[in-house]
Amino acid sequence: LSQTEGVHNTFDECVSDLPKLLDFVAQRSSATSRVKWVISSRNWPDIEERLVRAGHKVRLSLELNAESVSTAVNIFIEQKVSQLAQQKKYDERTQEAVLDHLASNASDTFLWVALVCQSLEKSHGGMCARS
């Protein structure tokens, strides 16, 4: 392999063995340039301290730019609702209702949107009417 990539979301939600996981990532990223990591996490000092050894890192703080986060979540909502509409054969009214509900309640939180969409994917039709 010429290059390997790892994407990890919400490191801050890892309760057990977080220090071990962070040390592993830092060690692997500084040991070889063939491995690329994308890590998503809240801005917690202990996480950043553990990753200080990681080589060639770029830090992007979305928490410091609320407008960017909001825009990204809204795009995510539109994509997920479009997928759901195709998968579940939503009519235009249902698609708009789901889109409006997600946009009104997401509070700029990807995880909440993803979990609601996951529930809708597994539903057998009646859940949209209750949402």
Image: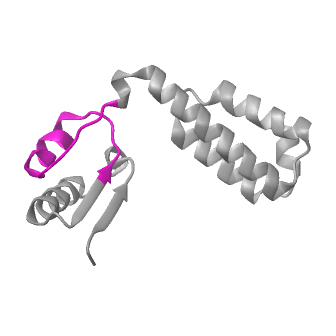
What residue sits 87% from the left and 48% below the top? Answer: 90
First to last magenta residue range: 38-61
The percent position of residue 106, horizontal first and vertical second, equals: 60, 31
Left or right relative to 72: residue 130: right
The percent position of residue 118, horizontal first and vertical second, equals: 66, 53
Instruction: Tell me, yes or no, if residue 14 can be seen here.
Output: yes
What residue sits 12% from the left and 52% below the top? Answer: 54
- Reply above or below: 12 against 4: above
- Reply above or below: 20 against 96: below
Examine the structure image and report whether residue 90 is included in the region drawn in magenta.
no
Q: Quadrant of the C terminus?
A: top right
The percent position of residue 71, horizontal first and vertical second, equals: 54, 28
Left or right relative to 101: residue 32: left
The percent position of residue 23, horizontal first and vertical second, equals: 14, 57
What residue sits 33% from the left and 42% below the top? Answer: 41
Examine the structure image and report whether residue 49 is included in the region drawn in magenta.
yes
Left or right relative to 108: residue 105: right
Q: Quadrant of the N terminus?
A: bottom left
- Depth order, front residue of 121/59: 59
Quarter-of-image position of residue 123: bottom right
**Residue furthest to the bottom:** 1
What residue sits 18% from the left and 53% below the top? Answer: 19
- Reply above or below: 21 against 97: below
Instruction: Tell me, yes or no, if residue 15 can be seen here.
Output: no
